[in-house]
């Protein structure tokens, strides 16, 4: 059962995240797992001490781009991203991460509470002057993580943990506490193929995997256009995607890949309209 953009946004604004149930069909989940399994077995064997391994820059991977590009360019996903951030959405990073299965005694261990990249709460949460903590103002995120899980999420595979509505405050978790369960945390209920769409100011953590299978998620990390980005936009495979988007006049896909000659102009036009409305309101009350 699919919910409307408005319903998702109401939840997102209140809690700092929303869940798109069944976002990736089961056969695609199986196809992705089957395709990347050998590479992750290799990566995990190479560094057995690491709790996760990542294949980054998915759009620049010859053998993977065809499998992954439709997931990222899905109009429903981009519609929601634009609803949340405005029409200024750029890709920061597109990757798949796999957690190898760990010994059973590590079950339910927390993989570090954190806020994601480009969050400003991290800068101010420990600042001595604390007046900002009295206000709980919702602001559009500078970045969003769209995380699609490729297995049911439970005690064995390792829950995603979230402190709901922490995108509205400056609560901080000390380094000593970052590896521990937190009072009030939600263990997010998810099945294979579900996508969690987060606000980058939300506090969250993964949990270690003891399921016997690899614990996978695909992360499409969106950011405001123009910010520094991790993925390359200059690879020949990306150029081909941009050529395709240009031929279809698909400006938002071009923008997603770092190309928009008009964004500043468009933003200033929106500001000018607001300033004119404010001026008209002042004049009307004279
Ligand atoms: O492991 C998870 O479920 C979440 C991962 C995460 O928060 C991250 O990679 O930033
Ligand atoms: Fe994260």
Image (tube, helix red, strand yellow):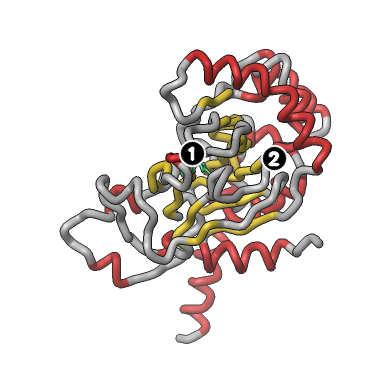
- Residue to which mark 2 is pinned: 252
Q: Is mark 2 within 8 Å of ligand 1?
A: no
Front residue of 285 and 247: 247
Q: Is residue 277 visible?
A: yes
Label 1 sits on a secondary structure element that is helix
Numbered circles on residues, count:
2
Mark 1 burial class by Cα count in 10 Å: few <14, some 14-19, many 20+: few
Left/right of residue 2 with respect to residue 109 in the rendered view: right
Q: Which residue is mark 1?
A: 104
Residue nearest the viewer, comparing 149 with 202: 149
Mark 2: which secondary structure?
Answer: helix
Residue 54: x, y in percent?
54, 26
Q: Position of residue 158 (x, y in %)?
A: 53, 45
Q: Residue furthest left?
A: 128
Residue at image location 77% in from the left, 45% down from the top:
75
Question: Residue at the spot x=81%, y=43% of the render?
Answer: 25
């Amino acid at each position: 059962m699919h919910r409307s953009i408005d319903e998702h946004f109401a939840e997102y604004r209140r809690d700092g995240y929303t869940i798109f149930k069944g976002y990736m069909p089961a056969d695609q989940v199986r196809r992705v797992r089957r395709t990347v399994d050998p590479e992750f077995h290799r990566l995990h064997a190479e560094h057995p001490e690491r709790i996760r391994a990542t294949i980054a820059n998915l759009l620049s991977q010859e053998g993977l781009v065809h499998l992954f590009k439709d997931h990222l360019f899905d109009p429903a996903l981009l519609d929601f991203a634009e609803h949340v951030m405005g029409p200024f959405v750029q890709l920061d990073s597109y990757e798949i991460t796999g957690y190898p299965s760990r010994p059973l005694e590590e079950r339910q261990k927390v993989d570090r509470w954190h806020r994601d990249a480009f969050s400003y709460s991290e800068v101010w949460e420990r600042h001595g002057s604390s007046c900002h903590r009295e206000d709980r103002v919702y602001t559009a995120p500078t970045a969003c993580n769209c995380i699609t899980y490729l297995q049911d999420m439970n005690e064995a595979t390792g829950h995603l943990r979230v402190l709901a509505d922490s995108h509205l405050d400056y609560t901080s978790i000390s380094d000593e506490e970052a590896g521990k369960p937190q009072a009030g945390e939600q263990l997010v209920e998810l099945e294979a193929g579900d996508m969690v769409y987060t606000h980058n100011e939300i506090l969250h953590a993964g949990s270690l995997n003891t399921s016997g299978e690899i614990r996978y998620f695909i992360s499409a990390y969106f950011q405001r256009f123009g910010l520094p980005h991790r993925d390359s936009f200059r690879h020949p495979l990306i150029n081909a995607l941009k050529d395709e988007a240009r031929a279809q006049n698909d400006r938002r896909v071009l923008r997603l890949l770092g190309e928009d000659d008009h964004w500043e102009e468009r933003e200033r036009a929106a500001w000018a309209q607001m300033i004119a409305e404010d001026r008209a309101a002042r004049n009307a009350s004279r």
